[in-house]
Amino acid sequence: MRVSKVILRTRILTAIPIILSLANIPHRGSSEGGQGELTLASKTDFWGAVLPIITLDYSARISSLLSVLSLSIYWTGFLLAISVKKTSNFKFILLTLLGSIGAIFSQQNLRDAFLLSFSILSFGLVEKFEATKVIVFRYLFLIPLIFAVTFKYPTSVAIVVLILFRFYAKRQLIYVKKFLLFLLSACFVIVIGISIDKGLANAASLRQGFVEQSVIYYDLAGFYCWSDDAQTRQMAIEALNPSLITQDPKEICLTHRPNAWVYLISGGNFIDKGVKAPLRQFIGAKDAKNATLLRSRWLNVILSDPADYIQLKFIAATQVITVGNPFLFSQLNFINKKFPYSFSDYVWWPISKILIIIGESYIFSVFVLILILLCLLNLGRFDQEVRLLIKFLLFVQVVNLIVLSIFYVSDEARYVFPIITISYLMLIKDIKITRNSSK
């Protein structure tokens, strides 16, 4: 009976990526930053280096290959992370459902999708080789974790902290003396990841995209439009002067929104009224001097008015904590269609309906996860290891919220999906209820 159950579970776990690959033909979801329409010499490093390098073009073939690559990395890590033999039926169903949802997300050609895939692989390697005495295998998880950082720096910070905590906690090294080692390890992984990304960008001769300008534009527009201090507003508009293309600076406030920076360079709600984008985006070596000047003046504004800056970050935090539907694309595939038109559509149809329900429930929002963790913590019926995990998951969500608020540029749910998925995976995998309260 036990053998047949293991065989059934193995078949299910083998069938899922095949079904999802069929449903994804030619490619469903979004793409970001691959710049497949450009030659390599014309691409920028605004979206990092790896995605522009591996996105050779925007053909269905390349899109499918990228999706399969990301899914393969993700599913390998997921299989390493779960134990088919030792998992109860209920827990296996939960893990498989969560893993399948993450697998669908991983198929999008996004930096966040690849970030999730490499993070799950790193997590799986930690779980698989926790007891090994072979040093190479024990620290193998660092390689995919470093690659995860290269795809998106801010959203990778909390993931690095969480996975390293998992590694050290399994080896019972989380004590006061080892806390410094834990922090140094996290800094090491992040610094190496950023260095590799920058090195790849230089090696591929990608043009500078000055990705920091997205945060800077958002902050300076907030200072200019929302500050009560006249001097702060004046400093903000002076900082924006090198990128200002409008004759009327007040148009910045007509295009600026609390939930995104991009309207400042693409136009906002009043395009039909003749209000165009007030700022231009810096790209390439010709804008390097202006980008440096922009960074310097931005820092001066923050230092001159830290109170307003903190208020702006609280506004950003409300955007981060409430966003939670990473599957908006699922309801766009069948607009004006009553029935599927291909075999792939038939496979995707029920999946898309499930994703719509999951997305609109906001299960993958920071707010819902924190609420669940607080409820679990106050139940008081878990052993100390699980309670420690719950507390650390809460800590990681706070860290993530702070980091994403500081580097805030948009209220995209895909920014928080990877860390929330990994948190749910750890929680479901480890949670067990004891008969007696831990109190």
Image: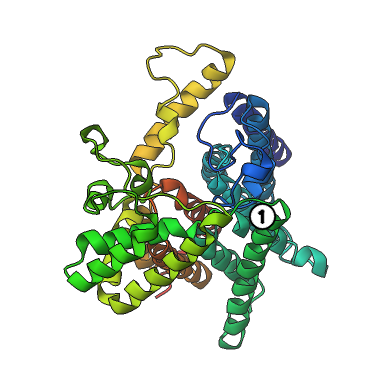
**Residue 93, located in which quarter of the rendered image?**
top right
Q: Nearer the viewer, residue 277 or 26?
A: 277
Q: Residues within 10 Å of mark 1 (few under 14, many from 20)?
A: many
Quadrant showing the C terminus: bottom left
Residue placed farthest to the bottom in the image?
Answer: 177
Q: Position of residue 17 (x, y in %)?
A: 64, 34
Q: Position of residue 271 (x, y in %)?
A: 27, 36
Helix, strand or loop for disc 1? helix
Q: Position of residue 63 (x, y in %)?
A: 63, 32
Residue labelled with disc 1: 201
**Residue 146, located in which quarter of the rendered image?**
bottom right
Tell me: residue 176, above or below residue 281.
below
Answer with left or right where residue 59 lies relative to residue 28: right
Residue 144 seen from this side:
no
Could you tell me which residue is drawn at 29 percent across and 62 percent down? 237
Answer with left or right where residue 101 lies relative to residue 269: right
Tell me: residue 55, above or below residue 183.
above
Quadrant showing the N terminus: top right
Q: Nearer the viewer, residue 130 or 107?
A: 107
Could you tell me which residue is drawn at 29 percent across and 48 percent down? 246
Tell me: residue 11, above or below residue 344.
below
Answer with left or right where residue 311 lies relative to residue 373: left
Q: Position of residue 139 (x, y in %)?
A: 74, 67
Q: Amino acid at mark 1?
A: Ala
